[in-house]
Amino acid sequence: MNILVTGGTGFIGSHTCVELLQEGHDVTVIDNLSNSCVSVLERITEITGKEIRFHHVDILNSQALEALFLSCEFHTVIHFAGVKAVGESVADPLKYYTNNVQGTLNLLQVMKKHYVKHMVFSSSATVYSPQNKMPLHEDSIIGPTNPYGRTKLMVEDICRDLCLCDAEMRIILLRYFNPVGAHPSGLLGEAPVGIPNNLFPYITQTAKGERDNLSVFGNDYDTPDGTGVRDYIHIIDLAVGHVKALEADLDSGIHVFNLGTGKGYSVLDIISAFEQATGRRVPYKITKRRRGDIAICYSNPEKAQTVLNWRAIRDLHQMCVDAWNYESKKATIRIK
Protein backbone atom coordinates (compact mmCIF):
# COMPACT_ATOMS: atom_id res chain seq x y z
CA MET A 1 0.00 0.00 0.00
CA ASN A 2 1.36 3.42 -0.98
CA ILE A 3 0.59 5.85 1.83
CA LEU A 4 0.91 9.63 1.89
CA VAL A 5 1.80 10.92 5.34
CA THR A 6 1.33 14.66 5.81
CA GLY A 7 3.47 16.16 8.57
CA GLY A 8 5.55 13.01 8.47
CA THR A 9 8.76 14.48 9.89
CA GLY A 10 7.00 15.60 13.09
CA PHE A 11 6.94 13.77 16.41
CA ILE A 12 3.92 11.54 15.82
CA GLY A 13 4.31 11.38 12.05
CA SER A 14 7.91 10.17 12.11
CA HIS A 15 7.21 7.38 14.59
CA THR A 16 4.19 6.32 12.55
CA CYS A 17 6.34 6.20 9.41
CA VAL A 18 8.68 3.78 11.20
CA GLU A 19 5.80 1.46 12.06
CA LEU A 20 4.36 1.67 8.53
CA LEU A 21 7.69 0.83 6.91
CA GLN A 22 8.25 -2.05 9.29
CA GLU A 23 4.85 -3.42 8.27
CA GLY A 24 5.92 -3.38 4.61
CA HIS A 25 4.06 -0.30 3.38
CA ASP A 26 5.46 2.25 0.94
CA VAL A 27 5.53 5.72 2.45
CA THR A 28 5.70 9.20 0.96
CA VAL A 29 6.08 12.13 3.37
CA ILE A 30 5.21 15.77 2.86
CA ASP A 31 6.06 18.44 5.41
CA ASN A 32 6.76 22.17 5.44
CA LEU A 33 9.45 21.63 8.14
CA SER A 34 8.09 24.48 10.26
CA ASN A 35 8.44 22.43 13.45
CA SER A 36 10.70 19.57 12.41
CA CYS A 37 13.85 18.82 10.43
CA VAL A 38 14.56 16.86 7.29
CA SER A 39 17.30 14.81 8.99
CA VAL A 40 14.49 12.87 10.68
CA LEU A 41 14.20 10.96 7.40
CA GLU A 42 17.77 9.70 7.71
CA ARG A 43 17.03 8.38 11.19
CA ILE A 44 13.85 6.66 10.02
CA THR A 45 15.97 4.91 7.38
CA GLU A 46 18.60 4.00 9.97
CA ILE A 47 15.94 2.38 12.17
CA THR A 48 14.04 0.57 9.42
CA GLY A 49 16.67 0.01 6.72
CA LYS A 50 14.17 1.41 4.22
CA GLU A 51 14.13 4.58 2.17
CA ILE A 52 11.32 7.07 2.44
CA ARG A 53 10.19 9.48 -0.25
CA PHE A 54 9.98 13.12 0.80
CA HIS A 55 8.52 16.27 -0.75
CA HIS A 56 8.91 19.69 0.86
CA VAL A 57 5.25 20.68 0.51
CA ASP A 58 2.95 22.84 2.62
CA ILE A 59 -0.70 21.74 2.60
CA LEU A 60 -1.66 25.40 2.24
CA ASN A 61 -0.12 25.25 -1.23
CA SER A 62 -2.88 23.78 -3.40
CA GLN A 63 -0.76 23.82 -6.55
CA ALA A 64 2.03 21.84 -4.90
CA LEU A 65 -0.48 19.27 -3.62
CA GLU A 66 -1.97 18.94 -7.10
CA ALA A 67 1.46 18.41 -8.64
CA LEU A 68 2.25 15.74 -6.04
CA PHE A 69 -0.97 13.80 -6.69
CA LEU A 70 -0.35 14.01 -10.43
CA SER A 71 3.11 12.47 -10.01
CA CYS A 72 2.22 9.77 -7.45
CA GLU A 73 -0.63 7.33 -6.94
CA PHE A 74 -1.69 7.04 -3.31
CA HIS A 75 -3.99 4.44 -1.81
CA THR A 76 -4.61 6.34 1.40
CA VAL A 77 -3.55 9.38 3.43
CA ILE A 78 -2.58 9.73 7.07
CA HIS A 79 -3.02 13.39 7.89
CA PHE A 80 -0.90 14.87 10.71
CA ALA A 81 0.07 18.24 9.22
CA GLY A 82 -1.03 21.24 11.24
CA VAL A 83 -0.20 23.44 14.20
CA LYS A 84 -0.94 22.02 17.62
CA ALA A 85 -0.30 24.20 20.70
CA VAL A 86 -3.31 25.08 22.86
CA GLY A 87 -1.73 28.23 24.30
CA GLU A 88 -0.57 29.52 20.94
CA SER A 89 -4.00 28.87 19.45
CA VAL A 90 -5.54 31.18 22.05
CA ALA A 91 -2.98 33.88 21.26
CA ASP A 92 -3.12 33.48 17.47
CA PRO A 93 -6.38 31.77 16.46
CA LEU A 94 -6.25 32.85 12.81
CA LYS A 95 -3.01 30.92 12.35
CA TYR A 96 -4.78 27.80 13.59
CA TYR A 97 -7.91 28.16 11.49
CA THR A 98 -5.82 28.84 8.40
CA ASN A 99 -3.35 25.99 8.83
CA ASN A 100 -5.59 23.30 10.28
CA VAL A 101 -8.89 23.93 8.53
CA GLN A 102 -7.92 25.49 5.20
CA GLY A 103 -4.95 23.14 4.85
CA THR A 104 -7.19 20.11 5.34
CA LEU A 105 -9.73 21.46 2.86
CA ASN A 106 -6.95 21.74 0.28
CA LEU A 107 -5.90 18.16 0.97
CA LEU A 108 -9.43 16.76 0.78
CA GLN A 109 -10.12 18.61 -2.46
CA VAL A 110 -7.09 17.14 -4.18
CA MET A 111 -7.88 13.69 -2.75
CA LYS A 112 -11.39 13.92 -4.18
CA LYS A 113 -10.10 15.00 -7.58
CA HIS A 114 -7.71 12.04 -7.72
CA TYR A 115 -10.15 9.46 -6.28
CA VAL A 116 -8.26 8.80 -3.06
CA LYS A 117 -11.07 7.57 -0.82
CA HIS A 118 -9.39 6.67 2.46
CA MET A 119 -7.89 8.87 5.18
CA VAL A 120 -6.78 8.56 8.80
CA PHE A 121 -7.02 11.94 10.52
CA SER A 122 -5.02 13.06 13.53
CA SER A 123 -7.73 14.49 15.76
CA SER A 124 -7.49 15.22 19.47
CA ALA A 125 -9.11 14.74 22.86
CA THR A 126 -9.39 18.54 22.96
CA VAL A 127 -12.65 18.21 20.99
CA TYR A 128 -14.38 16.99 24.17
CA SER A 129 -16.17 19.27 26.62
CA PRO A 130 -14.67 19.77 30.10
CA GLN A 131 -18.17 19.09 31.47
CA ASN A 132 -17.83 15.37 30.75
CA LYS A 133 -17.40 12.78 33.45
CA MET A 134 -14.20 10.80 33.12
CA PRO A 135 -13.15 8.67 31.40
CA LEU A 136 -13.99 10.08 27.98
CA HIS A 137 -15.54 7.77 25.42
CA GLU A 138 -16.27 8.43 21.75
CA ASP A 139 -19.86 9.49 22.50
CA SER A 140 -18.92 11.94 25.26
CA ILE A 141 -20.13 15.53 24.99
CA ILE A 142 -18.28 17.57 22.39
CA GLY A 143 -17.23 21.12 23.31
CA PRO A 144 -13.63 22.27 22.82
CA THR A 145 -12.42 25.13 25.02
CA ASN A 146 -9.73 26.57 22.73
CA PRO A 147 -9.17 27.37 19.04
CA TYR A 148 -6.88 24.36 18.55
CA GLY A 149 -9.63 21.98 19.67
CA ARG A 150 -12.20 23.84 17.61
CA THR A 151 -10.10 23.43 14.45
CA LYS A 152 -9.93 19.68 15.08
CA LEU A 153 -13.69 19.55 15.55
CA MET A 154 -14.28 21.60 12.40
CA VAL A 155 -12.18 19.13 10.39
CA GLU A 156 -14.09 16.22 11.92
CA ASP A 157 -17.36 17.84 10.82
CA ILE A 158 -16.02 18.45 7.31
CA CYS A 159 -15.02 14.78 7.11
CA ARG A 160 -18.49 13.68 8.24
CA ASP A 161 -20.17 15.81 5.60
CA LEU A 162 -17.80 14.50 2.93
CA CYS A 163 -18.57 10.90 3.85
CA LEU A 164 -22.31 11.63 3.75
CA CYS A 165 -22.11 12.83 0.16
CA ASP A 166 -19.64 10.18 -1.04
CA ALA A 167 -20.55 6.62 -0.12
CA GLU A 168 -17.06 5.38 -1.03
CA MET A 169 -15.20 7.62 1.42
CA ARG A 170 -13.80 6.09 4.60
CA ILE A 171 -12.27 8.45 7.14
CA ILE A 172 -10.98 7.34 10.53
CA LEU A 173 -10.82 10.04 13.20
CA LEU A 174 -8.27 9.20 15.89
CA ARG A 175 -8.76 11.28 19.02
CA TYR A 176 -5.59 10.81 20.97
CA PHE A 177 -4.47 12.11 24.24
CA ASN A 178 -0.92 13.11 25.31
CA PRO A 179 1.86 11.39 23.33
CA VAL A 180 5.22 11.20 25.11
CA GLY A 181 8.36 9.08 25.11
CA ALA A 182 10.59 8.30 22.14
CA HIS A 183 11.74 5.47 19.92
CA PRO A 184 13.74 2.99 22.07
CA SER A 185 16.72 3.36 19.73
CA GLY A 186 17.13 6.95 20.93
CA LEU A 187 17.20 8.10 17.30
CA LEU A 188 13.71 9.60 17.21
CA GLY A 189 11.89 11.67 19.78
CA GLU A 190 10.20 14.96 20.41
CA ALA A 191 12.44 17.76 19.14
CA PRO A 192 10.33 20.89 18.65
CA VAL A 193 11.80 23.88 16.87
CA GLY A 194 12.06 26.78 19.29
CA ILE A 195 9.99 26.84 22.49
CA PRO A 196 8.34 23.48 23.28
CA ASN A 197 4.57 23.24 23.53
CA ASN A 198 4.32 19.97 25.46
CA LEU A 199 5.31 18.90 28.97
CA PHE A 200 7.96 16.26 28.35
CA PRO A 201 10.48 18.34 26.37
CA TYR A 202 10.42 20.84 29.25
CA ILE A 203 11.00 18.03 31.74
CA THR A 204 13.89 16.48 29.84
CA GLN A 205 15.51 19.85 29.12
CA THR A 206 15.22 20.80 32.79
CA ALA A 207 16.67 17.46 33.88
CA LYS A 208 19.54 18.02 31.46
CA GLY A 209 20.26 21.45 32.95
CA GLU A 210 19.25 23.44 29.88
CA ARG A 211 16.46 25.08 31.90
CA ASP A 212 16.64 26.25 35.51
CA ASN A 213 13.22 24.84 36.35
CA LEU A 214 9.97 23.55 34.95
CA SER A 215 6.87 25.77 35.04
CA VAL A 216 3.80 23.95 36.34
CA PHE A 217 0.76 25.85 35.12
CA GLY A 218 -1.62 25.95 38.07
CA ASN A 219 -1.91 23.94 41.28
CA ASP A 220 -5.48 24.92 42.16
CA TYR A 221 -7.39 22.56 39.88
CA ASP A 222 -9.93 20.14 41.37
CA THR A 223 -7.51 17.20 41.19
CA PRO A 224 -5.75 15.16 43.91
CA ASP A 225 -2.67 17.43 44.00
CA GLY A 226 -4.10 20.51 42.31
CA THR A 227 -2.19 20.08 39.03
CA GLY A 228 -3.72 19.11 35.70
CA VAL A 229 -4.36 15.42 35.02
CA ARG A 230 -3.83 13.94 31.56
CA ASP A 231 -3.72 10.57 29.81
CA TYR A 232 -0.09 10.12 28.69
CA ILE A 233 0.50 7.54 25.96
CA HIS A 234 3.81 6.23 24.66
CA ILE A 235 4.50 7.48 21.15
CA ILE A 236 5.15 3.94 19.85
CA ASP A 237 1.76 2.75 21.11
CA LEU A 238 0.16 5.74 19.42
CA ALA A 239 2.00 5.09 16.15
CA VAL A 240 0.92 1.43 16.19
CA GLY A 241 -2.66 2.65 16.67
CA HIS A 242 -2.47 4.47 13.35
CA VAL A 243 -1.25 1.33 11.58
CA LYS A 244 -4.04 -0.72 13.17
CA ALA A 245 -6.60 1.86 12.04
CA LEU A 246 -5.21 1.88 8.53
CA GLU A 247 -5.29 -1.90 8.21
CA ALA A 248 -8.66 -2.46 9.93
CA ASP A 249 -11.50 -3.98 7.91
CA LEU A 250 -13.92 -1.10 8.29
CA ASP A 251 -16.88 -0.08 6.15
CA SER A 252 -17.01 3.23 4.33
CA GLY A 253 -18.06 6.25 6.35
CA ILE A 254 -16.79 7.89 9.53
CA HIS A 255 -15.14 5.93 12.33
CA VAL A 256 -14.02 7.52 15.60
CA PHE A 257 -11.58 6.04 18.12
CA ASN A 258 -9.91 7.26 21.29
CA LEU A 259 -6.23 6.35 21.54
CA GLY A 260 -5.12 6.53 25.15
CA THR A 261 -4.17 4.38 28.11
CA GLY A 262 -7.30 4.93 30.17
CA LYS A 263 -5.22 6.25 33.09
CA GLY A 264 -4.77 9.83 34.25
CA TYR A 265 -1.58 11.26 35.78
CA SER A 266 -1.04 14.72 37.21
CA VAL A 267 1.91 16.94 36.29
CA LEU A 268 3.46 16.25 39.70
CA ASP A 269 2.93 12.50 39.15
CA ILE A 270 4.88 12.79 35.91
CA ILE A 271 7.73 14.72 37.51
CA SER A 272 7.99 12.14 40.29
CA ALA A 273 7.87 9.21 37.86
CA PHE A 274 10.55 10.79 35.67
CA GLU A 275 12.87 11.39 38.63
CA GLN A 276 12.44 7.80 39.80
CA ALA A 277 12.95 6.33 36.30
CA THR A 278 16.04 8.36 35.43
CA GLY A 279 17.62 9.43 38.70
CA ARG A 280 17.59 13.01 37.44
CA ARG A 281 16.14 15.88 39.48
CA VAL A 282 13.49 18.11 37.88
CA PRO A 283 13.15 21.38 39.84
CA TYR A 284 9.85 23.13 39.21
CA LYS A 285 7.90 26.23 40.11
CA ILE A 286 4.15 26.80 40.22
CA THR A 287 2.85 29.50 37.89
CA LYS A 288 -0.63 30.66 36.93
CA ARG A 289 -2.95 28.56 34.81
CA ARG A 290 -2.77 28.74 31.04
CA ARG A 291 -5.83 29.97 29.17
CA GLY A 292 -7.65 27.13 27.45
CA ASP A 293 -6.41 24.36 29.77
CA ILE A 294 -8.81 22.08 31.65
CA ALA A 295 -8.39 20.24 34.95
CA ILE A 296 -8.62 16.59 33.96
CA CYS A 297 -8.75 14.53 30.76
CA TYR A 298 -8.29 10.81 30.27
CA SER A 299 -9.72 8.21 27.93
CA ASN A 300 -11.83 5.14 27.72
CA PRO A 301 -9.93 3.23 25.00
CA GLU A 302 -12.18 0.14 24.92
CA LYS A 303 -13.60 0.78 21.44
CA ALA A 304 -10.12 0.78 19.87
CA GLN A 305 -9.26 -2.37 21.80
CA THR A 306 -12.39 -4.14 20.56
CA VAL A 307 -12.62 -2.92 16.95
CA LEU A 308 -8.98 -2.29 16.04
CA ASN A 309 -7.41 -4.95 18.28
CA TRP A 310 -5.17 -2.22 19.70
CA ARG A 311 -4.21 -1.24 23.20
CA ALA A 312 -1.43 0.77 24.82
CA ILE A 313 1.11 -1.62 26.35
CA ARG A 314 3.96 0.66 27.47
CA ASP A 315 3.75 2.12 30.97
CA LEU A 316 4.71 5.49 32.43
CA HIS A 317 8.14 4.21 33.50
CA GLN A 318 8.94 3.24 29.89
CA MET A 319 7.72 6.61 28.63
CA CYS A 320 10.13 8.38 30.99
CA VAL A 321 13.08 6.08 30.25
CA ASP A 322 12.71 6.43 26.48
CA ALA A 323 12.20 10.20 26.60
CA TRP A 324 15.37 10.60 28.67
CA ASN A 325 17.32 8.19 26.44
CA TYR A 326 16.49 10.35 23.43
CA GLU A 327 17.32 13.59 25.22
CA SER A 328 20.64 12.13 26.36
CA LYS A 329 21.61 11.06 22.84
CA LYS A 330 20.22 14.08 21.02
CA ALA A 331 23.54 15.97 20.99
CA THR A 332 25.16 13.13 19.02
CA ILE A 333 22.35 12.95 16.45
CA ARG A 334 22.23 15.18 13.41
CA ILE A 335 19.21 17.37 14.20
CA LYS A 336 19.06 20.35 11.90
Image (tube, rainbow, N blue to C red):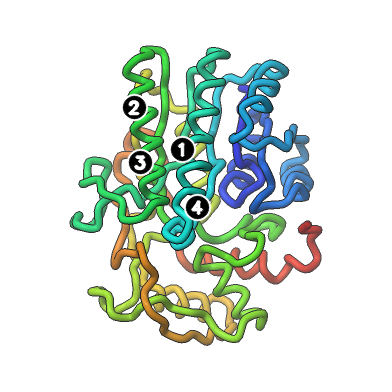
Instruction: Say which label, 2 or 1, has the lower sequence index.
Output: 1
Q: Considering only vertical position in the picture, is 296 above or below 254?
A: below
Amino acid type assigned to the residue bearing label 1 in the image: Val
Residue 9 horizontal/vertical position (percent): 66, 45
Amino acid type assigned to the residue bearing label 2 in the image: Arg
Q: Bin the neighbour count of mark 4 within 10 Å (Cα to Cα): few under 14, some 14-19, many 20 and up.
A: many
Residue 303 appears in the figure? yes
The numbered mark at residue 101 is: 1
User: How many numbered marks appear?
Assistant: 4
Point 43% across, 51% down: residue = 312
Residue in the foreground of this view, choosing between 236 and 114: 114
Q: Which quadrant of the structure image shows residue 289?
A: bottom left
Instruction: Say which label, 3 or 1, has the lower sequence index.
Output: 1
Q: Considering only vertical position in the picture, is 122 above or below 145?
A: above
Residue 91 horizontal/vertical position (percent): 45, 61
The numbered mark at residue 152 is: none
Give the residue pinned by disc 3: 153
Instruction: Say which label, 2 or 4, has the lower sequence index.
Output: 4
Instruction: Say which label, 1 or 4, has the lower sequence index.
Output: 4
Give the residue pinned by disc 2: 160
Instruction: Say which label, 4 or 3, has the lower sequence index.
Output: 4
What is the spatial separation of the Cα atoms under label 3 and label 1, in whole angstroms?
Answer: 10 Å
Q: Secondary structure at mark 3?
A: helix
The image quadrant where one finds the N terminus is top right
Instruction: Say which label, 2 or 3, has the lower sequence index.
Output: 3
Give the residue pinned by disc 4: 84
What is the spatial separation of the Cα atoms under label 2 and label 4, in whole angstroms?
Answer: 22 Å
Q: Which quadrant of the structure image shows residue 56?
A: top right
